[in-house]
Amino acid sequence: MVQVSILQTDLYQLTMMAAYFREGMNPTSTFELFVRKLPPNRSYLIFAGLEEALEVLEDLHFSTKEIDYLQSLPSFAHIDKSFFEALRNFRFEGEIWAAKEGEVVFAGEPLLRVTAPLLEAQLIETMLLSVINMSTMIASKAARVVSAAQGRDVVEFGTRRAHGPEAGLLAARSSYIAGCVGTSNVEAGHRYGIPVVGTCAHSFIMSFAKEEDAFRSYAAAFPEHATLLIDTYDTLQGAHLAAKATPKLRGVRLDSGDLATLSKKVRVILDQEGQPDAKIVASNDLNEEKIAQLLKEGAPIDIFGVGTELATSKDAPALGGVYKLVAQEDAPGHVRYVLKNSPGKPSYPGAKQLYRFYSDEGHAKHDLITLAEEHPPQGSEALLSCVMRDGKRTRPAPTLQEIQAYSKSTLARFPQELRELASELHYPVQRSAKIDEARQVALDAMPKSMD
């Protein structure tokens, strides 16, 4: 589980809670999390971070030290002590509906729906957005990288360039969901069961007087797992020396230079030296475009190690996921639809469901967003299901391997054109007529500006 303190939130979540408490306002409220628009060069997203977020919610509470700190803040100087006493018993006890982790999703679609007392639903906004925005962003990037590799293995190497240790763990987890076969992050292996992969650094090679001594030493220490870094000095000479370092070399890594040309020459050397099974691993600021170009040039690379570009989603480093209030129960049995009508940032009222339609061959055709109370459209699949009720999961958490397998299978149901790196295909996402009707009702009920 990602380590999250309840204070890892925006101050205004807590000040709003205090103001609600002061007014005696705590109606059952529904919020929805969605992404307004796809980032550049993205034709779809891979929804990720759900299971981590649910685990955080099950244990969310305030410690005495955290409450004491809040009381010390100037912002809370006039807040009655009863609010802080109430925080001692705070737990999330709401209901959550969400898409499956690993699902292919699109802009404007409800990915997660929270229904809970207002104070609870408000407080968890920042945590949900933080975990899901980053995880979905990285998983979506990783899906592109894995697709570009055309069946060759991709390993996530990005912890040292991630935005902090916890970000490195989420990046490893999200990358694995989207199809990476492993990570260099040992804690990700320990925490999530992701296969861990590693070679050695240039410093190891340079610490020996002779390159061949470094190779022999590393191969002797790790006879079944030695992948030798051969570009510290002369790459082709390094390939010859690595091939002679051990009778059965697992692989070599290229981390600089013209990877297409070098990999071809290294493959010839390894074969000539009696190491036909040795794999060629390539790294060096790789991304999906570079990988696609390498394979287009016929580079005989078996494994791609992708670091900075993957762990930071460097070309699209932020995802604009938002969390908006859509409905509120003002009185028992009376639900008021709520919307935001800001220029360029509209929202649609009411709790919603998301349906997907498939062709007779099982290929995804289009999605439809409806109000949750509408009857399911014939021939569709509902994508949102109840994953938490009364603050507890409704089913055991799937394994990361199960999530990865689901993501792979669901992505395969979409047109190949959508999965291409430069795809211009716009997958159809529609809204039901009742949503537009509900929006108009909510607009008509909004306070009118004074002339």
Image (cartoon, grey):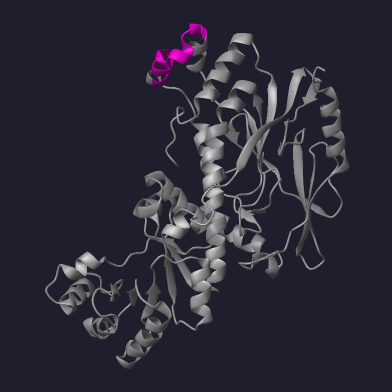
Which range is magenta?
A: 66-82
Label total for image: 0
Quarter holding the N terminus? top left
User: Residue at image x 83%, y 38%?
Assistant: 435
Residue 72 part of the magenta segment: yes
Residue 385 part of the magenta segment: no
Residue 283: quadrant of the picture: bottom left
User: Residue at image x 30%, y 80%?
Assistant: 249
Give the side of residue 68 with respect to residue 115, left or right.
left
x then y, percent, for residue 184: 37, 59
Q: Is residue 328 above or below residue 167?
A: above
Q: Is residue 32 above or below residue 450?
A: below
Give the side of residue 216 with respect to residue 300, left or right.
left
User: Residue at image x 29%, y 84%?
Assistant: 236
User: Residue at image x 29%, y 73%?
Assistant: 229
x then y, percent, for residue 440: 86, 32
Residue 308: quadrant of the picture: bottom left
Q: Is residue 178 visible?
A: no
x then y, percent, for residue 416: 68, 69
Q: Is residue 249 above or below residue 12?
A: below
x then y, percent, for residue 99: 66, 46
Q: Farthest residue in the left direction?
A: 209
